[in-house]
Image: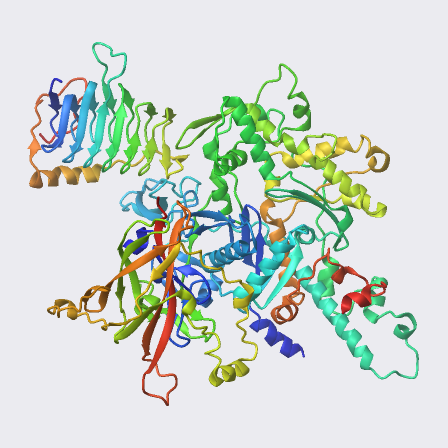
């Protein structure tokens, strides 16, 4: 038995890990500490003569074609292996649209004939990189910020919080501030905005943020960004206020720290203390200078206010540092998960071909417990 | 326009190029054929050891408020103007050891320090000031600061000044005595 | 060149339903079908470095993480770095010794040098360049060992449980029967190390420690002058996924990524469609089944403007790329017989039964796109046309008198110009795309014997559908 397994292990090709983010795609081999490539999630479309984003689709057919092109680029230009007969670990958000998952499954299994796909949610994978039992994962992506509590290896589904507070929101606010500063609609491209956001913007500390609107506050220094069309002066206002949208509290209570606290609030009471003591802030958006410190300060302040004061006031927040750069934390988790069990949890190709169905948490077929009185009906 | 071309001893200037206005070419400088240098807004002074390659264009533009006497455009030593680059400028000073790569364009509102590299096909049209050792490249005009000035092209200059007379008609240096203000470092002639 | 720079006016419908110009299509000689990049299987053939054109065996490429051992890419602009030599002055003022040659890396595009980031010059040209190691490797490996041990333990427990099922029960009730505890669990509860050696990894593992302190920005951060030239762009960060340096001073030269040559394979019959030569310097192929060499090529010579309800003339050029005479007939696209049934011969079913799981079902998973609607129809001649074989020497021969008539404009070796009439629908919208489609029936002589026993050639009648893009419908 053991010998046979050994042979199987040698023959099994090293699986690949795919984290297809909205802006950047991370791709590489399992068991490696860092992805082989981090590239923009876009490809050259010869039909449309432009770079096309993978997420730029109207219907399933277009998405199918986009994914085929993107995976071709990843396999044959960057990682240089045959997709055939090789397993894939797909890192996905729990809130990935069903259409996207199923089309991706179809592309992987049918077009590229991969031997198996392990579907794993990014929150649990982020928690894997720490090795802690209870973790609160705050993932700030390109579009959304997602807060998921992972308690003993399972995400607390009903407590998931998500809001459009990703790097994209910061870019949009930056564009607005720059237009305001120059008194003109500048129509800056996403690319330029991203560059300014990454290199020039920062998140001021809480003490400074409070004084921002007071008269007499010294503005931050301006910087000049040179480009082919213009030399753009990015004022101090734009530099330090662009990320304030993430902390803007309104009646909806939809700011980033609110999302975190709401998630804790909806978790089982015995896990709350541990969750607060094990916060991991990750994702490409979290790499913004000063963001983590500010989030920590805001959280500590907000627990003392209603409606959180009554139940959460005694929480002590502590933060983890993942053993990899912010943007590839969930990828690294996928690399660990894929390497640890040798892909035994993957959905195999022949199984998929028979039923053409993916397990998914919102689907009653997969989540109804066997002792439920509807279980028998669902099985047939 | 008055023609007043001063070529210092040691300069290699091909005959087949357009030189208009008041132009001074320093010793050791090599000017390839088909180069256009137009000093319409005032004199152009090119220092020693510059290389100006084919189809390069240097224009001293007329400013709207012309001063009398017109101020010169001074181009420092060891500058390299590569094939088909174009420099338009008002009076002023361009530093030394700059490289203007092929098909680059530098507009009149750009101030250039020393040791800068303007990458191939970069069109600098917006007003800006390039600090010393700035390198600009690519269509996005990425820039960075080099550690040190670009190395001098002395070997290349030496080779060109030897080879050029074999294949091209040259203009003769017309100033034979050394100018006390800008001593030529060339002692061959 | 026209194929590279111009839009594609004539497109063929691939057997998978995609519309492609003839230069992007393949022709499988075994299935006798047109294939395109979308419906064939791509495979990695050989690894090579595009800079030094050096081949690398795939096992070595895997070991080196798909990176060339001698070429480096600029971390600043991703151009290839060049090695430059300088004469080092001996700091000790060593007299008599000739100055030593020292080497450093330099980028000709953005003038980045290895000296910029303080990498010392090397005494040998080929390298010994310091590699930056991933600072997280140790921790990552700890985690990996930990999870592997857990997976191993889990598997072991599963096996134990299974084995227990078949163990004939002894006379005596043991602990497991009584309490449902397995030995491993009992040991676990008691805090004892379980029997496997992997457990030491598990017990020694230290989870990540959270800290209440987060690195805060200094209070006067907003007043500090920042130099954007010292902060890396996001593309510079992502080009080094291990470190993602945010400061330009932390950039380091990266070994250049390798490229691959791909071979392409028909999914239906697993035969190679293209196979490149192994030598990286060669752009030739060992196998090259391109549609361009097998399918009659159609080019538009000229056409009259397309008006709704009108008729316009269309001049087409047909050419026969094969070495055999070809009979071509033009059909309306709907008259093309359905070829799917035709191929379900006994041989095919046999092959299928042997291949068991070889399914072509992927084709069904991607719905065929209907071709764009036609703006009208092409009035096609009912005659069969004969195209002579391609003969490279014929160009120098005297032209035989062509059999010009009202359809054939001229004939020249393997080429033929046709004069056709287009009828545009009266309902065609002005300004919409004027697409016209027709099908070609052509004879094809397959020179590849289907098996070793059969020697003679086989002749086939094949069909292909084309779509002509004739600009816009005009007033």
| Residue at 61% across, 42% down | A143
| Residue at 41% across, 70% down | C336
**Percent from the top left, x then y, of residue C21?**
36, 59
Q: Can residue C113 be spotted in the picture? A: yes
From the viewer's side, name the closer residue of B3 and B77.
B3
Q: Is residue C116 above or below residue B47?
A: below
* Image colouring: rainbow
From the viewer's side, name the closer residue of C224 and B152.
C224
C134 to the left or right of C111:
right
C95 to the left or right of C67:
left
- Quadrant location of the N terminus of chain A in the rendered image: bottom right
Tally of numbered tags = 0
> Residue C297 sits in which quadrant?
bottom left
Q: Is residue C217 above or below residue A46?
A: above
Q: Can residue A31 be spotted in the picture? A: no
**Percent from the top left, x then y, of residue A83?**
52, 65
From the viewer's side, name the closer residue of B148 and A98.
A98
**Percent from the top left, x then y, of residue B87?**
26, 28
Q: Is residue C391 above or below residue C453?
A: above
């Amino acid at each position: 038995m053991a010998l046979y397994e050994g042979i199987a292990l040698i023959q099994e090709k090293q699986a690949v890990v795919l984290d297809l983010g909205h802006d950047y795609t991370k791709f590489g081999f399992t068991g490696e500490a860092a992805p082989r490539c981090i590239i923009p999630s876009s490809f050259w479309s010869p039909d449309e003569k432009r770079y096309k984003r993978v997420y730029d689709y109207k219907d399933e057919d277009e998405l199918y074609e986009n994914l085929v092109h993107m995976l071709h680029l990843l396999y044959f230009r960057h990682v240089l292996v045959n997709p055939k007969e090789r397993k894939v670990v797909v890192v996905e958000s729990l809130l990935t649209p069903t259409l996207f998952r199923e089309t991706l499954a179809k592309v992987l299994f049918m077009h590229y004939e991969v031997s198996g796909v392990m579907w794993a949610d990014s929150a649990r994978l982020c928690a894997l990189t720490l090795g802690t039992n209870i973790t609160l994962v705050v993932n700030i992506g390109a579009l959304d910020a997602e807060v998921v509590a992972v308690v003993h290896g399972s995400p607390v589904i009903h407590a998931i919080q998500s809001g459009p507070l990703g790097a994209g929101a910061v870019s949009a606010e930056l564009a607005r501030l720059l237009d305001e500063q120059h008194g003109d609609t500048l129509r800056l491209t996403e690319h330029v905005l991203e560059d300014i956001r990454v290199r020039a913007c920062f998140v001021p500390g809480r003490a400074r943020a409070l004084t921002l609107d007071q008269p007499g506050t010294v503005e931050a220094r301006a910087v000049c960004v040179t480009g082919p069309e213009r030399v753009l002066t990015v004022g101090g206002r734009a530099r330090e206020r662009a990320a304030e949208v993430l902390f803007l509290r309104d009646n909806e209570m939809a700011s980033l720290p609110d999302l975190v606290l709401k998630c804790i609030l909806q978790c089982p009471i015995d896990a709350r203390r541990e969750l607060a003591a094990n916060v991991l802030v990750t994702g490409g958006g979290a790499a913004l200078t000063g963001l983590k410190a500010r989030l920590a300060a805001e959280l500590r302040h907000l627990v003392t206010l209603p409606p959180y004061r009554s139940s959460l006031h005694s929480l002590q927040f502590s933060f983890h540092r993942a053993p990899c750069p912010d943007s590839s934390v969930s990828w690294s988790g996928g690399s660990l998960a894929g390497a640890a069990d040798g892909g035994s949890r993957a959905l195999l190709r022949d199984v998929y071909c028979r039923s053409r169905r993916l397990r998914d948490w919102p689907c009653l077929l997969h989540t109804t417990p066997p002792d439920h009185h509807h279980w028998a009906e669902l099985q047939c | 326009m008055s023609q007043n071309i001063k070529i210092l001893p040691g300069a290699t200037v091909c005959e087949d190029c357009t030189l208009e206005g008041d132009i001074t070419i320093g010793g050791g400088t090599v000017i390839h054929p088909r180069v256009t240098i137009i000093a319409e807004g005032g004199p152009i002074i090119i220092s020693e050891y510059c290389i100006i390659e084919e189809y390069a264009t240097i224009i001293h533009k007329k400013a709207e408020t012309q001063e009398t006497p017109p101020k010169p455009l001074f181009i420092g030593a060891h500058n390299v103007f590569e094939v088909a680059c174009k420099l338009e400028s008002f009076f002023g000073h361009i530093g030394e050891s700059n490289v203007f790569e092929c098909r680059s364009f530098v507009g009149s509102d750009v101030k250039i320090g020393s040791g800068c590299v303007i990458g191939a096909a970069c069109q600098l049209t917006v007003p800006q000031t390039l600090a010393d050792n700035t390198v600009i490249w690519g269509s996005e005009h990425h820039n960075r600061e080099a550690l040190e000035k670009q190395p001098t092209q002395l070997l290349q200059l030496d080779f060109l000044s030897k080879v050029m007379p074999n294949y091209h008609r040259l203009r003769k240096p017309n100033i034979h005595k050394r100018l006390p203000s800008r001593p030529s470092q060339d002692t061959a002639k | 060149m026209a194929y590279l720079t111009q839009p594609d006016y004539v497109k063929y419908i691939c057997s998978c339903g995609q519309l492609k110009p003839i230069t992007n299509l393949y022709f499988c000689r075994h299935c006798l079908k047109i294939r395109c990049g979308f419906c064939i299987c791509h495979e990695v053939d050989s690894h090579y470095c595009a800079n030094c054109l050096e081949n690398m065996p795939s096992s070595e490429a895997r070991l080196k993480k798909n990176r060339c051992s001698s070429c480096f890419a600029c971390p600043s602009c991703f151009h290839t770095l060049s090695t430059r030599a300088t004469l080092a002055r001996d700091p000790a003022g060593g007299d008599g010794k000739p100055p030593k040659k020292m080497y450093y890396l330099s980028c000709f595009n953005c003038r980045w040098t290895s000296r910029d980031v303080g990498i010392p010059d090397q005494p040998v040209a080929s390298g010994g360049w310091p590699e930056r190691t991933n600072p997280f490797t140790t921790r990552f490996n700890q985690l990996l060992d930990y999870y592997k041990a857990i997976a191993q333990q889990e598997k072991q427990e599963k096996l134990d449980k299974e084995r227990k099922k078949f163990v004939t029960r002894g006379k005596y009730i043991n602990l497991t029967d009584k309490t449902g505890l397995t030995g491993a669990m009992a040991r676990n509860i008691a805090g004892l190390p379980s029997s496997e050696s992997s457990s030491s990894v598990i017990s020694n593992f230290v989870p990540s420690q959270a800290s209440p302190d987060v690195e805060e920005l200094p209070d006067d951060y907003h007043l500090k002058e920042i130099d954007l030239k010292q902060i890396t762009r996001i593309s510079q960060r992502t080009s080094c996924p291990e470190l993602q340096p945010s400061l330009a001073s932390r950039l380091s030269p990266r070994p250049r990524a390798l490229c691959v040559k791909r071979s392409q394979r028909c999914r239906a019959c697993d035969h190679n469609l293209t196979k490149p030569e192994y030598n990286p310097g060669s752009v030739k192929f060992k196998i090259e089944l391109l549609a361009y060499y097998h399918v009659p090529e159609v080019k538009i010579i000229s056409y009259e403007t397309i008006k709704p309800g009108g008729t316009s003339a269309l001049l087409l050029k047909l050419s026969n790329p094969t070495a055999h005479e070809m009979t071509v007939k033009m059909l309306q696209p709907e008259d093309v017989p359905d070829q799917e049934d035709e191929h379900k011969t006994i041989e095919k079913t046999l092959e299928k039964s042997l291949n068991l799981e070889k399914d072509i079902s992927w084709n069904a998973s991607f719905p065929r796109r209907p071709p764009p609607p036609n703006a009208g129809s092409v009035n096609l001649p009912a005659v069969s046309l004969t195209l002579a074989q391609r003969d490279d020497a014929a160009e120098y021969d005297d032209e035989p008198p062509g059999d010009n008539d009202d359809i054939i404009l001229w004939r020249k070796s393997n080429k033929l110009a046709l004069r056709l009439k287009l009828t545009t629908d009266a309902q065609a919208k002005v300004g919409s795309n004027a697409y016209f489609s027709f099908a070609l029936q052509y004879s094809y002589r397959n020179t590849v014997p289907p098996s070793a026993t059969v020697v003679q050639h086989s002749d086939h009648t094949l069909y292909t559908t084309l779509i002509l893009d004739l600009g816009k419908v005009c007033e």
